[in-house]
Amino acid sequence: MPIVVNLDVVMARHKIGLSELAARVGLTHANLSVLKNNRARAVRFSTLAAICRALGCQPGDILAYVKGEEDDGENP
């Protein structure tokens, strides 16, 4: 998938752990871990907004488009 989740980088920059962020955002540790480890197939805008609010960042700090072999040519 050409979308990469850089949540771990942003979390490290803000010195916040997964459990603390999960509590602030209102997600389970397991669900946030799926997103952090780039295994999520989708993310709700409300979840993304809550993460950005908790970390004081922008969606583009967390998500990045990387063109590469895995780009399956889906419509943009």
Image (tube, helix red, strand yellow):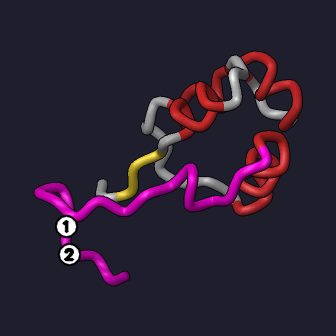
Image point (77%, 27%), residue name: 21
Between 47 and 54, which is closer to the camera in this rendering?
54
Category of crowding for the residue at label 2, using alpha-carbon neighbours closer than 10 angstroms: few (below 14), some (14–19), many (at least 20) = few
Measured as percent of width and height from the top left, residue 33 is found at 58, 26
Residue 29 is inside the magenta segment? no
Tag 1 near tag 2, CB within 8 Å: yes
* Three-letter code for the amino acid on which mark 2 is drawn: Gly
Would residue 19 appear left or right of 32 to someone viewing this image?
right
First to last magenta residue range: 56-76
Q: Choose between 35 and 7: the one closer to the eye.
A: 7
Q: Position of residue 57 (x, y in %)?
A: 71, 52
In the image, residue 19 above or below residue 48: above
- Relative side of 43 to 49, left or right: left
* Amino acid type shown at disc 1: Asp
- Nearest to the observer: residue 5 or residue 35: 5
Which secondary structure, mark 2?
loop
Magenta run includes residue 67: yes
Q: Is residue 53 above or below residue 24?
A: below
